[in-house]
Image (spheres, helix red, strand yellow):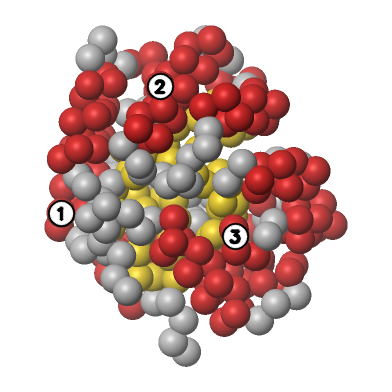
Amino acid sequence: MNMKLFDAHCHLQDPRIYHISSEKIKSAREAGVVHIAVNGVSENDWQLVKEMSENNPCVISNFGLHPWFILDRNPDWLRNLKQFLQSTPEAAVGEIGLDRAPWASHVDYTDQVEVFQKQLQLAKEINRPASIHCVEAFDDLIEILKSLGPFPAGFLLHSYNGSHDLVPQLADLGAYFSISGHLMPMELSKAKKILKAIPLDRILLETDSPDALPTTICSDPNLSAASDEEMLNHPANIHYVLEYVASLLEMEKEELAQMSFNNARKIFSYGDTKISA
Ligand SMILES: [Zn+2]
């Protein structure tokens, strides 16, 4: 088996997994994962992400303020972000976004919109792609994408689980749709509809590790006595996402692997890219 895979979105700097990130990167490499896009979520972790990418040629850094963490931002956050992006020519913008779910209700939504728009604008200005989190806010997202777009460097909707109806409109706006284990608990027919709506040249695979452990792993009886560490998702598990998406799309795994790899390579190829030809 000689499949190449690209984990388009994860968080190896997360405190739950950082201490074992080197071995997780190694096991991912052994499993055919050629590139791993690691996303910062707050100013506190950008330096860690940057160092990880400096120490590991396979890691592509993404710097951004995730909507859950904007309350901690410094007055100088935008200048700080710009500095990180400018000093890391291969970095993308992420994770940024909008979240209207109940668990994000402590973060003022008007604030979320403002911080998101500034980061999206910055991505456009410096011609970098953006990795976007959107939960229950697709109407607003579409409006913002229309008003600030187009985005020649592209953007990806991470762990996409919006309606299948929205896919054509988002695709027209330039979206790539990145699929993770977050989709797996969804009713099969519904998930299938979403996946089938995505143009094949816009589909990406991600783990969102250490979150989104594929349900195929959680339900494995051999793992009933698993340690906490084994229950943490990591980039090599992208194989489970590949298998799931391929089966719903009724495609060969190898074909989907190659297609999603090429798509990811396309969106992450810009500036002084780390992506090899
Ligand atoms: Zn994420």
Three-letter amino acid code at disc 3?
Ile
| Residue bearing mark 2 | 118
Task: Report the disc number at residue 54.
Answer: 1
Which secondary structure, mark 3? strand
Q: Quadrant of residue 229?
A: bottom left
Q: Residue at x 39, y 14 (%)?
A: 71
Marks 1/2 in contact by CB < 8 Å: the verdict is no
Circle 1 or circle 3, nearest the eye? 3
Q: Earlier in the sequence, mark 1 or mark 3?
A: 1
Gap between marks 3 and 2 measured at Cα: 26 Å
Return the x and y of residue 196 as percentages of the image width and height.
76, 61
State the residue in front, 176 or 210. Answer: 176
Which secondary structure, mark 2? helix
| Residue bearing mark 3 | 203
Q: Earlier in the sequence, mark 1 or mark 2?
A: 1
Which secondary structure, mark 1? helix
Marks 3/2 in contact by CB < 8 Å: the verdict is no
Vertical comparison of 164 with 101: above or below: below
Q: Is residue 110 left or right of residue 249?
A: left
Vertical comparison of 93 with 249: above or below: above
Return the x and y of residue 169 as percentages of the image width and height.
71, 42
Three-letter amino acid code at disc 2?
Lys
Q: Residue at x 60, y 80 (%)?
A: 255
Q: Is residue 80 left or right of residue 178?
A: left
State the residue in front, 46 or 130. Answer: 130
